[in-house]
Image (cartoon, helix red, strand yellow):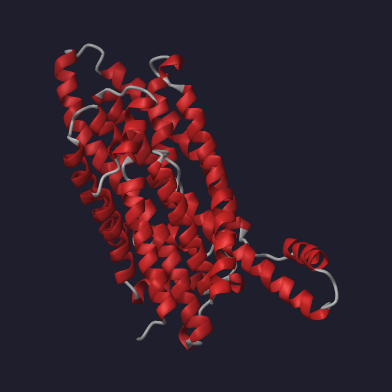
Amino acid sequence: MDLPILLIIIIALALVFDFINGFHDAANSIATIVSTKVLTPFQAVLWAALWNFAAFFTALYIIGEFRIGNTIAKSVNEDFINLEVILAGLIAAIIWNLLTWWFGIPSSSSHTLIGGFMGAALMHALVTQYTLISGVHPDAGFAHNLMQALKNLLSLDVVKYDKVIPIFLFIFLAPIIGMVISVIITLIIVFVSRKSNPHKSDRVFKKLQLFSSALFSLGHGTNDAQKVMGIIGAAIIYHHVQTLHDPIYLALESKERFSYFVTHYVWVPFASFLAIALGTMSGGWKIVKTMGTRITKVTPLEGVSAETAGAITLFLTEHLGIPVSTTHTITGSIIGVGLTKRISAVRWGITVSLLWAWVLTIPVSAVVAGLTYLLVTFIK
């Protein structure tokens, strides 16, 4: 089947975003294993990339579905989605990701993408309302029609809040869950190994960290690659429903379309998981340094605790179908191991800076996406 040029551009940009996510976000999964010198940065990115890609087979053959991808695709009402909306959201997400990567800020690629998608959809709805009102009241001023359009926008169901509210809540819950699990695991390990020889224990935990980092990378791939899948899925579903008027898609309920899309476009999840793995291989040392050394110094024992706690959190949220930030999750887990030593072991100045970046990611991405949508529609 021939795909329109704009849809091809969207798919290409989505995979570019996925690749950028690899070196921006996936660096979190190697931060502790690098800072504890279990692996060199080069070895670590290869190890993480391998397990990022292995997550495709886990999701397809073991879990059997892509719940997070479905959540992303359904986070915006289908009535307010078109290809320009998706394109604008992707461009905004890429811009914010590159800026935060350049300055070494571990912001969330996940929330960047979600914020961009919602911001572009809201701007599309606002422009549509303004056009309708201007057609009815051509003599009214710009400000009057704009204010009326904004009022109408508030009554429209553009964003599906049953999907989006849990995503917002887990901006804070994911790191808290990771932190609590990390504290519990660390205390258990310290208690069990309290009589062990320190040097022997250190060697054992360095070997265990290979397992825990692989587990976290598997969770990261399962979580993050699906978000790009969801965006591509939304674009392809729009094409089948609105452009082709495909009777098969039209006959399906909205919630069933994504599952049908996955079975007939299996190359999309494959490409999404492959792109994030390739991105991971490209590195991300600036962010590794922030995550692995500036928040708190981490030993191999603590690295095992943080990565295992992060992996448990990611698998839990994947089971619930809630997209979360691996950045937030591993940050909370690293803070947790720091708290088991003493509160002052955590460098709270760095942590507060990260928190501000997290809070601002969605609204900033939404604003940039809204402006990008206006530019895209103007050029078109």
Determine whether, in the image, residue 197 is placed left or right of residue 160: left
The quarter of the image holding the C terminus is bottom right
Can you tell which quarter of the image residue 95 is in?
bottom left
Locate residue 172, reporting x and y percent. 53, 38
Locate residue 161, reporting x and y percent. 62, 56
Could you tell me which residue is drawn at 25 percent across and 55 percent down? Answer: 278
Locate residue 34, reporting x and y percent. 24, 32
The quarter of the image holding the N terminus is bottom left
Can you tell which quarter of the image residue 207 is in?
top left
Q: How many marks?
A: 0
The one of 230 and 219 positioned closer to us in this rendering? 230
Position of residue 37 relative to residue 44, above or below, is above
The one of 9 and 176 positioned closer to us in this rendering? 9
Could you tell me which residue is drawn at 18 percent across and 21 percent down? Answer: 202
Locate residue 149, reporting x and y percent. 76, 67
Position of residue 276 relative to residue 269, above or below, is above
Can you tell which quarter of the image residue 123 is in?
bottom right
Is residue 57 shown to the viewer in this render?
yes
Position of residue 329 relative to residue 13, above or below, is above
Is residue 322 shown to the viewer in this render?
no
Position of residue 270 relative to residue 198, above or below, is below
